[in-house]
Image (tube, grey):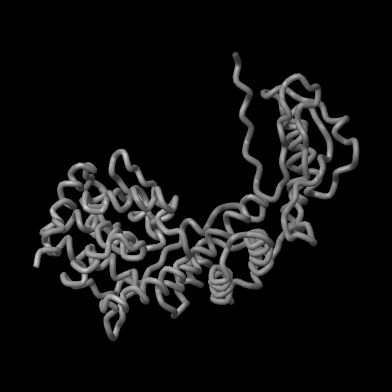
Amino acid sequence: MPKRKKHPKLPNGYGSIRYLGKGRRNCYAVHPPAKEDPETGRYVNPAALCYVSDWYVGFTVLTAYKAGTYTVGMEKALQPVADDNPSELTQRILADYALIRRDPLENDPTFAEVYEAFYTDKYFEGNTYSQSSKNSTRAAFNNCKMLHNKSFRSLVSKDLQDNLDACPLKHASLELIQSLYSGMYHYAEGCGLCDKNYAAYVTIKTEDDDESGVPFTENEIRKFWKYQDDPIIEFALIMCYSGHRISEYNVLDIDLKSHLFKGGIKTRTSRKRIVPIHSAIYPLVCRRLKRDGKMLNMSYNTYLKLFKAKLNELGCLGKDPIHTPHDCRHTFSWLCQHCQVQEDDRKRLLGHAFKDVSNDVYGHRDPEDLRIEIEKIHVDVVTSV
């Protein structure tokens, strides 16, 4: 059975040509570019300009529409041509395209306008996002002032990178800006508001400054094991023996059959990593998933409040600074070092990037090799009196 011919991808903001399926005489629907609904802020696909039998006729109609030369019914005068003789349509397309290049695009919103449409689309009424998430998105936008009044379509990765590099705030704030870029470009691509996802080329060039923290002591970990049936301490132990950031646990692919945590967030290295589930916490992971349906069934702020209260009750909260859930990740790193887990594997388990090319590109490790390393962390190392 012959395959349907593939046609060139249309530029973003150009409109669309939809194939409606075989069995129709005019099997292509020609739609103008998506437009924003002023009431909802969302972009909607307008009704078709016409229906045609040939993709190239549809493309000619769209080009005429963009150039302002389209008239209703003009498609009837355009005849499909053989692939080896497209000269007549080509001349028509080139003439109209020249007009498009001379005139500014009508659908050319600024960075700020795309942001407002993106924000409305993401945080529509009835969604489940927290106020903290909304505030973070607003804060990231406010740190992009040099981009606000620029045409979104005219921006390239250098513009985005320059704005990020000029921001004097901490790494966490830069991450919010980078996340905003990604969200806006994902939205803009779907609406035909950009020609390319330039957010994919933006990187944070400063060192990560949110990795500071204090590991729990051996005595504190011993006490945790005594209270492992408490859901707050249960999760703290899971974090101490797996090393993920707290925000990662609900996005992990947890393979109980293979005893593996897969994935992560924040960096490319984190997203690719595999962490064997330590045998000591495997029953806790199973119990938690069976009981709660997920690793963390509350917001971070709620868990943080309960975490501090429980640690204060156990006399493990600490002083200047007090412990936070992120200290569980530092505890895992310390346990790896204390139990002589190979340094390269410790970095792999934590999702840290390698600075040397040989390890970063060629240093692959089998999950079972990593399991051997992580099982070096014996619970009796920290539970024996």
* 59 on left or right of 303: right
* 332 on left or right of 253: left
Residue at the far bottom in the pictured view? 320
Q: Residue at x 85, y 33 (%)?
A: 75
**Residue 249 drawn at (x, y percent):** 39, 56
Nearer to us in this view, 236 or 142: 236
Q: Residue at x 50, y 68 (%)?
A: 177
Considering the image in quadrants, where does the N terminus appear? Answer: top right
**Residue 97 drawn at (x, y percent):** 74, 46
Number of marks present in the image shown: 0
Q: Is residue 65 above or below residue 213?
A: above
Residue at the far right in the pictured view? 72
Q: Is residue 277 above or below residue 307?
A: above
**Residue 11 drawn at (x, y percent):** 65, 46
Residue 6 position by quadrant: top right
Nearer to us in this view, 328 or 228: 228
| Residue 353 seen anywhere in this rendered image of the structure | no
| Residue 81 seen anywhere in this rendered image of the structure | yes
Residue 324 position by quadrant: bottom left
Nearer to us in this view, 46 or 129: 129
Considering the image in quadrants, where does the C terminus appear? Answer: bottom left
Residue at the far top in the pictured view? 1
Q: Residue at x 47, y 63 (%)?
A: 298
* 27 on left or right of 256: right
**Residue 253 drawn at (x, y percent):** 39, 46
Q: Is residue 262 above or below residue 41?
A: above
